[in-house]
Image: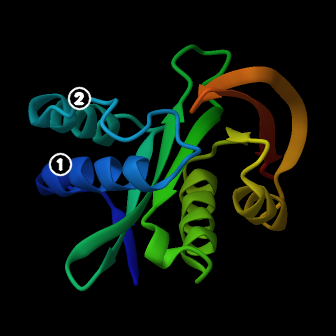
């Protein structure tokens, strides 16, 4: 598995990966088919991120195919530019094999190199494997968003989690 920064020519493979991850995972913000992918907008997003010092997308590549991603979207105002919001996804066949750990380790290296101070995310309270990964990587729970998401006819809480970098 090779972790690297996204490239312009990854727009379509990333769009397809996100679609697959959303179809497989019950805990992503968008469910199967809810997001309407658009290659032009995907390319614009990659361009915007590559031009921003406090945002990035890392992808995990296996045999020339994308298997997972970690997005870090930096704050846009002077008061929160030190902070990034994370979104992580991977194909289910790669879960439990250390890919999430690798993505988060590389993301943290990138954040330190870019003098960022805070990594933050939200996670569905029933997504036990993701919570275990985040806690293993040093994230702490800061709060709960009660009844935050409505998934398959049921309300779910989300946890706010964050890691402060030295």
Count how many numbered circles sit on residues in the image.
2
Helix, strand or loop status at disc 2: loop
Q: Is residue 120 visible?
A: no
SS of the residue under disc 1? helix
Q: Earlier in the sequence, mark 1 or mark 2?
A: 1
Check disc 2 and report the residue beneath it. 36
Along the line of sight, the residue nearer the viewer: 57 or 77? 57
Identify the residue at image location x=65%, y=33%: 83
Q: Is residue 38 above or below residue 25?
A: above
The mark closer to the camera, 1 or 2, is 2
Quadrant location, the N terminus: bottom left
Asked which quadrant contains residue 61, the reply is bottom left
Q: Which of 33/123 is in front?
A: 33
Query: Percent from the top left, x then y, of residue 102?
Result: 57, 74
**With 35 as the anchor, is 11 left or right in this view?**
left
Q: Which residue is mark 1?
A: 11
Which residue sits at x=30%, y=56%?
Answer: 17
Against 50, is 68 above or below? Answer: below
Alpha carbon separation for disc pair 1 and 2:
14 Å
Percent across and percent down for residue 40 are 10, 31
Residue at image location 32% in from the left, 55% down from the top = 20
Give the crowd class for mark 1: few <14, some 14-19, many >=20 residues within 10 Å. Answer: many
- At 26% from the left and 33% from the top, the residue drawn is 45
Q: Relative to 134, is 109 on the left or the right?
A: left
Q: Which mark is residue 82?
A: none
Q: Position of residue 55 (x, y in %)?
A: 45, 39
Horizontally, residue 3 falls left or right of residue 76, namely left
Q: Nearer the viewer, residue 151 or 120?
A: 151
From the top left corner, tell me how far across and down residue 121 is, in percent.
67, 39
Q: Is residue 87 left or right of residue 4?
A: right
């Amino acid at each position: 598995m090779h972790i690297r920064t996204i490239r312009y020519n990854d727009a379509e493979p990333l769009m397809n990966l996100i679609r697959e991850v959303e179809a497989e995972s019950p805990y992503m913000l968008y469910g199967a088919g809810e997001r309407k992918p658009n290659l032009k907008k995907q390319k614009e997003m990659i361009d915007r991120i590559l031009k921003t010092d406090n945002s990035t997308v890392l992808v995990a590549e296996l045999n020339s195919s994308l298997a997972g991603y970690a997005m870090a979207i930096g704050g846009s105002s002077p008061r929160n530019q030190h902070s990034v919001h994370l979104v992580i996804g991977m194909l289910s066949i790669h879960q439990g094999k250390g890919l999430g750990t690798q993505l988060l380790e590389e993301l943290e290296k990138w954040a330190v190199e870019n003098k960022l101070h805070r990594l933050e995310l939200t996670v569905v309270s029933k997504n036990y494997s993701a919570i275990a990964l985040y806690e293993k990587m040093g994230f702490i729970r800061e709060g709960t968003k009660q009844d935050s998401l409505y998934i398959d006819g049921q309300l779910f809480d989300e946890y706010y989690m964050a890691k402060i970098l030295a």
